Image (cartoon, rainbow, N blue to C red):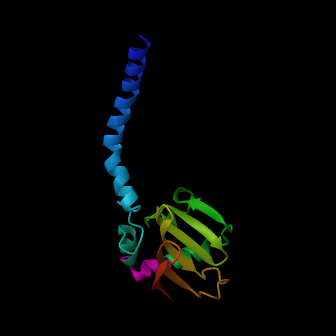
Amino acid sequence: MRGRTKLAIGLAVAIPIGFLALAVGPMFLAVALDPHAGFVCDGDSPEAAAARLIPSARLEQLFLDVRANAPWEAARRYPKSELPEAFQDLEFVSLHAEVPGSIHLHLRGCFDHHVFLEVHGADGTNKYRGEQIVLTYGEFDEAEEVLWTP
């Protein structure tokens, strides 16, 4: 009797695990072969493409809006819902006040790859970068494109 009970318990556990492996296996294999499968957080992402299409006049207004709402609390992330109306027409997840003079609009994140629209120099303190808006994307060796300068 004990042998049959062990067999029944073994089958009761093995069969659902087998079905789960069949269901999840292909997805796991795709992610194992390409850890960013289905996630695009580089220059080809829809968010990066949309950022490139923002008119120069709107980018200039973004720069002025960041300046008008300074000072930003350093090392803080602001959810979009906490920001003034002036920011609500843009598509982003949150605003990061990284260091004095640099505000990052977080457009998308995939694991450790991100797409940001960075506003530099709006508070007059970022002398290194000057006044500009830059699209950055990628992992550690981020690529960047200057989208606006005064």
The reply, left or right, for residue 55 in relation to residue 116 is left
In the image, what residue occupies the spot 61% across and 76% down?
102
Is 55 included in the stretch rendered in magenta? yes
In depth, the one of 46 and 73 nearer the eye is 46
From this view, report whether residue 91 is shown above or below residue 66. Answer: above
In the image, what residue occupies the spot 47% across and 85% down?
148
The boundaries of the magenta stretch are 53-61
User: Residue 73 appears in which quarter of the rendering?
Assistant: bottom right
Circle count: 0
Q: Residue furthest top?
A: 1
Residue 9: image location, x then y, percent: 41, 21
Residue 56: image location, x then y, percent: 42, 82
In the image, what residue occupies the spot 38% across and 57% down?
31
In the image, what residue occupies the spot 53% across and 56% down?
81
Q: What secondary structure characterizes most of the magenta part? A: helix
From this view, report whether residue 2 is shown above or below residue 101. Answer: above
In depth, the one of 71 and 20 nearer the eye is 20
Residue 4: image location, x then y, percent: 38, 15
User: Residue 5 appears in which quarter of the rendering?
Assistant: top left
The N terminus - image quarter: top left
Is 27 included in the stretch rendered in magenta? no
In depth, the one of 118 and 44 nearer the eye is 44
Residue 122: image location, x then y, percent: 60, 80
